[in-house]
């Protein structure tokens, strides 16, 4: 098995905003559908088969909430690891690492905010990426529960 690198973790971290957005969207769709479905039941409540469907539907919503909970734990741990990596870099390299991977900014946005050209920022990002690819994740870099949280988040 290929060792996990800091680059692998930072790629995961960069995807967390999109994952959170997807889970929020799924949850909102479920909540909206439940509201519409229960509004049609009337005073007597749903028939038996509908109750079973509703329980299954609610269980799926619970699973989304569980995934969301573990996503937050994983995200926090990856952010902590990103901060740990930042300590090994200097000035603008630190900004590129943190803003690009942790805050999900574009290279252009990092350059503009820090007052550098986009070309220079892209060169620095390449240097940071090389550093990340050369840095293997060591035991203790991530908390012991990280792999378990990933499995829970992904539903395995």
Image (tube, grey):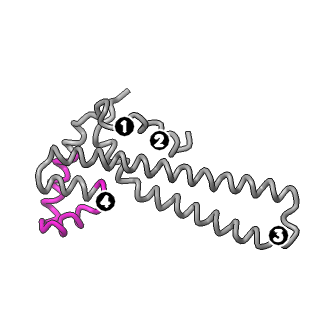
Name the secondary structure under disc 1.
loop
Residue 114 sits in which quadrant? bottom left
**Whole-number angstrom distance, CA of label 1 to CA of label 3:** 47 Å
Q: Pointers 4 and 3 in contact (CB under 8 A)?
A: no
Q: Earlier in the sequence, mark 2 or mark 3?
A: 3
Q: From the viewer's side, name the closer residue of 121 and 92.
A: 92
Q: Quadrant of the N terminus?
A: top left
**What residue is shown with label 3?**
41
Q: What residue range appears in magenta?
A: 101-129
- Marks 1/4: CA distance? 21 Å
Q: Return the mark for residue 103.
A: 4
Assign a secondary structure to mark 2: helix
Find the distance from the CA under tag 2 to the CA under tag 4: 21 Å
Q: Give the residue at x 31% y 32%.
A: 140
Q: Is residue 99 left or right of residue 117?
A: right
Task: Give the residue displayed 70% in from the left and 56% down from the top.
Answer: 57
Find residue 81 and report its image quarter.
top left
The answer to whether 83 appears left or right of 31 in the picture is left
Q: Secondary structure at mark 3?
A: loop
Q: Nearer the viewer, mark 1 or mark 4?
A: 1
Magenta-drawn stretch, dominant element (helix, strand or loop): helix
> In this picture, is 8 found above or below 104?
above
Quarter holding the C terminus? Answer: top right
Residue under numbered circle 1 = 143
Residue drawn 18% across and 69% down? 112
- Name the spot of residue 142 as percent of width and height, x first: 34, 38
Q: Which residue is mark 2?
A: 149
């Amino acid at each position: 098995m290929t060792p996990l690198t800091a680059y692998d973790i930072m790629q995961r971290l960069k995807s967390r905003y999109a994952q959170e957005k997807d889970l929020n969207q799924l949850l909102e769709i479920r909540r909206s559908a439940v509201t519409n479905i229960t509004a049609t039941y009337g005073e007597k409540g749903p028939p038996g088969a509908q109750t079973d469907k509703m329980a299954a539907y609610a269980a799926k919503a619970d699973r989304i909430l569980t995934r969301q909970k573990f996503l937050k734990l994983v995200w926090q741990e990856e952010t902590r690891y990103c901060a740990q990596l930042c300590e090994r870099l200097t000035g603008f390299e630190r900004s590129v690492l943190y803003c690009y991977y942790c805050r999900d900014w574009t290279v252009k946005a990092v350059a503009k905010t820090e007052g550098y050209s986009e070309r220079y920022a892209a060169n620095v990002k390449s240097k940071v990426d090389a550093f990340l690819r050369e840095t293997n994740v060591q035991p203790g870099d991530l908390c012991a529960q990280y792999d378990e949280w990933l499995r829970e988040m992904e539903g395995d």
